[in-house]
């Protein structure tokens, strides 16, 4: 397995272009199932997750052609299989979201339940209830969801009991071709859902209320192909913003939009980091001689502070002056980076959904292990500021969501390298 080695202490100076959003790209790829015409996606990140999903979609008979720069053309001329096996779904949770589109397009699908993921139990009950409300008959058999809709799906009023990004997207993907009107209440408003909804509309869908918590979908009888540019990855952008703040220096993040990370930059500014919005991103500046102030954060649904940036912010707080209280409200087990950060000398105590971080004067490099995608980038961020060398194992987590991570950081002067392992199997 590959490892990442970082020698901390270098200031970061330079420019980092933000890639297309993983969490939008994989939902847009699933949307290709809904039409027999080609869907051309540009600004596509090349990541382990987009590769896995491409593999799964090919198993359904789609052609998935990648061409440079960052373009993928998906074509579901004919669906030849509606079976999503465990081995392909377990690699990436979001591949469960092919169930709705397959069901809509063919009237039947058998998709493995996604495997347990380390950040929480992450059930799919809301996804299944939404599909049932649209008329799907669902049975659970030996770890698989078997769904049929012999008479097609029908529009319905669906009120989610709480906000779920995945269930909102799944319901949307299923509702666009359902007969009649669907209203989704307490829908998630994450920008990636807006991206998906706008793309579906460009394909001929009729979705109103985009970027609000009530989505109204008027079903149409077919969708056409289109060309769509994936929105910038706000989590990648936020991660590099925190990296620049942690290491010190001046980094310009480009090819994005400052408002996508407003909740994060608000907290960074409160901690003493200089953040300058630009027309296509932000500039982050910090004099490493000036110590940051501890500030508190609570993760929330968009536009609140993203849970996917919580680990990175915790890394930043390890060197701040004072105590920072971090509340994680979205996932019940998303502090696994805390013990790894403590291996570098951080002082953190965790009680349920609350972590208390007491800033220390210095971190010292050590061997650590990535436990999940965003946890792994928090270790990279901490390693950039730690004295000496940090090596991070299990970087396949990182490869799920960060395109050209080493190259992007190296371009800003970081001493980061990948040590190739014998096998990347996990
Ligand atoms: C691929 C992708 O886009 N992943 C993102 C998506 O995950 P994902 O779509 O899985 O996150 P959800 O918003 O659905 O999950 C929020 C909470 O709802 C719970 N829940 C969800 C569905 C369900 O049927 N039942 C249920 O109980 C989950 O366990 C979690 O505690 O949104 C999360 C919250 O912003 C992000 O951290 C993930 O990066
Ligand atoms: C948790 C994440 O992804 P997934 O939902 O695919 O596990 C993430 O992107 O941070």
Image (cartoon, rainbow, N blue to C red):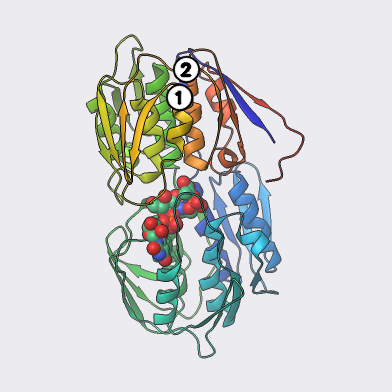
- Occupied quadrant, residue 127: bottom left
Q: Which mark is residue 382?
A: 1
Q: Position of residue 24 (x, y in %)?
A: 47, 53
> For the residue carrying disc 1, how many other residues have a C-alpha within 10 Å: few (<14), some (14-19), or many (20+)?
many
Q: Image quarter for residue 113?
A: bottom right
Residue 361 lies left or right of residue 31; in this view the side is left
> Does 401 sit above or below residue 166?
above
Left or right, 179 with reference to 88: left
Give above or below for 234 relative to 216: above
Residue 352: % across, % down = 33, 46
Quarter of the view holding residue 362: top left
Residue at the far top in the pictured view: 289
Q: Which residue is mark 2?
A: 386
Q: Position of residue 425 (x, y in %)?
A: 71, 45
Q: Is mark 1 within 8 Å of ligand 2?
A: no
Secondary structure beneath label 2: loop
Specify the quarter for ligand 1. Answer: bottom left
Position of residue 375 measured from the top left corner of the image (x, y, whole percent) = 47, 38
At 30% across and 57% down in the image, what residue appears?
211
Residue 54 placement, left or right of 130: right
């Amino acid at each position: 397995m590959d490892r990442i080695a970082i020698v901390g202490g270098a200031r970061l100076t330079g420019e980092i272009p933000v890639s297309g959003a993983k969490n939008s790209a994989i939902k847009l790829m699933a949307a290709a199932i809904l039409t027999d015409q080609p869907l051309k996606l540009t600004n596509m990140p090349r990541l382990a997750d987009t590769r896995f999903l491409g593999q799964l979609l090919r198993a359904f008979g789609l052609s998935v052609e990648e061409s440079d720069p960052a373009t993928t053309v998906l074509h579901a001329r004919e669906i030849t299989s509606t079976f999503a096996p465990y081995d392909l779904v377990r690699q990436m949770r979001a591949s469960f979201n092919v169930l709705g589109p397959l069901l809509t397009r063919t009237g039947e699908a058998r998709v493995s339940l996604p495997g347990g993921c380390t950040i929480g139990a992450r059930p799919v009950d809301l996804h299944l209830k939404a599909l049932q409300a649209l008329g799907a008959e669902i049975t659970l058999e030996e770890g698989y969801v078997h769904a049929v809709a012999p008479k097609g799906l029908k529009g319905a009023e669906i009120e989610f009991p709480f906000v779920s990004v995945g269930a909102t997207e799944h319901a949307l993907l299923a509702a666009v071709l359902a007969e009649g009107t669907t209203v989704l209440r307490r829908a998630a408003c994450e920008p990636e859902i807006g991206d998906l909804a706008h793309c579906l509309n460009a394909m001929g869908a009729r979705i109103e209320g985009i970027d609000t918590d009530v989505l109204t979908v008027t079903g149409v009888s077919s969708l056409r192909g289109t060309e769509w540019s994936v929105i910038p990855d706000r989590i990648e952008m936020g991660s590099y913003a925190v990296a620049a703040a942690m290491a010190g220096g001046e980094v310009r993040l480009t090819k994005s939009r400052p408002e996508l990370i407003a909740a994060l930059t608000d907290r960074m500014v409160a901690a003493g980091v200089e953040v300058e919005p630009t027309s296509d991103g932000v500039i982050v500046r910090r004099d490493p001689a000036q110590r940051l102030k501890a500030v508190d954060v609570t993760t929330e649904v968009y536009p609140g502070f993203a849970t996917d940036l919580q680990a990175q912010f915790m890394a930043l707080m390890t060197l701040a002056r004072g105590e920072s209280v971090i509340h994680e409200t979205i996932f019940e087990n998303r502090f696994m980076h805390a013990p790894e950060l403590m291996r570098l000398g951080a002082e953190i105590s965790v009680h349920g959904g609350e972590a208390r971080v007491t800033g220390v004067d210095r971190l010292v490099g050590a061997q650590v292990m990535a436990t999940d995608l965003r946890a792994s980038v928090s270790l990279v961020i901490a390693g950039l500021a730690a004295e000496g060398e940090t090596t991070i194992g299990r970087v396949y987590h990182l490869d799920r969501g960060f395109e050209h991570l080493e190259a992007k950081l190296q371009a800003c002067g970081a001493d980061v390298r990948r040590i190739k392992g014998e096998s990347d199997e996990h």
